[in-house]
Amino acid sequence: MSDQIPFNRPPRVGTEFTYAEEAFQFGQISGDGPFTKRCSTLLQEALGVPRALLTTSCTHALEMTALLLEVGPGDEFIIPSFTFTSTATSYAIRGATPVFVDIRQDTLNLDETLLEAAITPRTKAIVVVHYAGVACEMDAILEIANRHGIPVVEDAAHALFGKYHGKKLGTLGAMGALSFHETKNFSCGEGGAILLNDSKFINRAEIIREKGTNRSQFFRGQVDKYTWCDHGSSYLPSDLLAAILLGQLEAREKIQARRKTIWERYHSELADWAQANGVQQPTIPDGCEHTYHLYYLLMPSLEARTEFIAELKAKQIMAVFHYQPLHLAPMGKKFGGYEGQCPVTESIADRLVRLPMFFNMSEDENDRVIESILKIQVG
Ligand SMILES: *Cc1c(COP(=O)(O)O)cnc(C)c1O
């Protein structure tokens, strides 16, 4: 029996322990130590954003965006129904109501043609997700949002270093949120970052992240003592986690190149099989440089997907489905979600399957997944 191929293994580039050891040697492993600063600087320079702050997760980065936009009870926020729960919870936790919008058939991103109709006088934010690291139609989305004076937040959990017509994802809206969870391209286990693309948010973001205090200004010598100034929480990751993350961010070209190879092999070597079996492969529109975050297939039906996953599992290959429609989740229904509200999301959620794909995946494992799929007849 061959070894199991997991759906994911956390990325390892080899510098993790050396840097973690250095963090201990330096003598500070709480937040905002030297490695946190190096990660922030690297992100700011690589993305060209005024400020990038590491956070304990992407969820927390999104919660910070809700605090910065002063989202509260009575407000609405627009999100795609096909996303991770954090996109919804980070704003719902402030008492706001999610308004679910359906997705496009091709990129599985928020359908920009449905956006304007979802806007009301209470819309406080539009939170978009670049699914699989493929950009949303940001020109159209930003045009509509700007016309209504509504800020756009990018949930860029999949999208770090992806581009839309040459512009970097996470830097197009007012703010962006990144994830360094173990399933993401770059990871320290649990972690994230908030990208502040508009300088007006920087001061308050630093305060919110530091338990409502102006401690960051104090350390820069801008004030002579620090105190409670605003709402806040503890959104700083340990410098140990930043040490682990730094090595991976520095190795970003190597990580992305490896993921690209795996992704492209799936894409080209499964093309004829997909065509013959009524299976849809991902679409990457012109102008989108994606991040090779995940490789998915759209099966013709839920039954076909169930069988496909079982056949791969019998060969020790772990393929998995993805988001269930948020509007049909128990919480989504409490906010008025109903069957048929987002038909594309409902259909895609039942049919999508993700193949194993991770930085440390061997060529042999990549081959085995492809060979096993080529033997499956989708019925
Ligand atoms: C992973 C993910 C998140 C949450 O990230 P955490 O760092 O685990 O909080 C949010 N949104 C999307 C689209 C994700 O994929």
Image: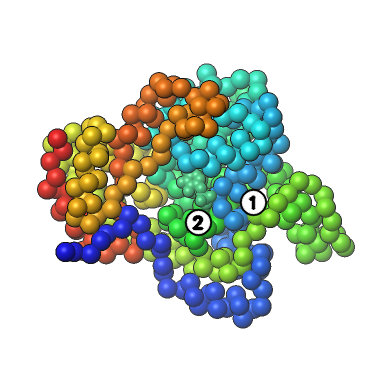
Mark 2 touches mark 1? (CB < 8 Å): no
x, y percent for residue 225:
87, 62
Q: Dividing the picture into quarters, in which one does residue 218 lie?
A: bottom right
The residue at which mark 2 appears reads as 180
The residue at which mark 1 appears reads as 50
Name, please, the residue furthest toward the right: 224
From this view, report whether residue 305 is shown above or below residue 213.
above
Q: Earlier in the sequence, mark 2 or mark 1?
A: 1
From this view, report whether residue 19 is shown above or below residue 109.
below
At 65% from the left and 58% from the top, the residue drawn is 236
Q: Left of 184 or right of it: where is 273?
A: left
Q: Left of 7 or right of it: where is 165?
A: right
Nearer to me, 269 or 79: 79
Chosen colour scheme: rainbow
Quadrant containing the N terminus is bottom left
Mark 2 vs ligand 1: CB below 8 Å: yes
At 41% from the left and 69% from the top, the residue drawn is 13
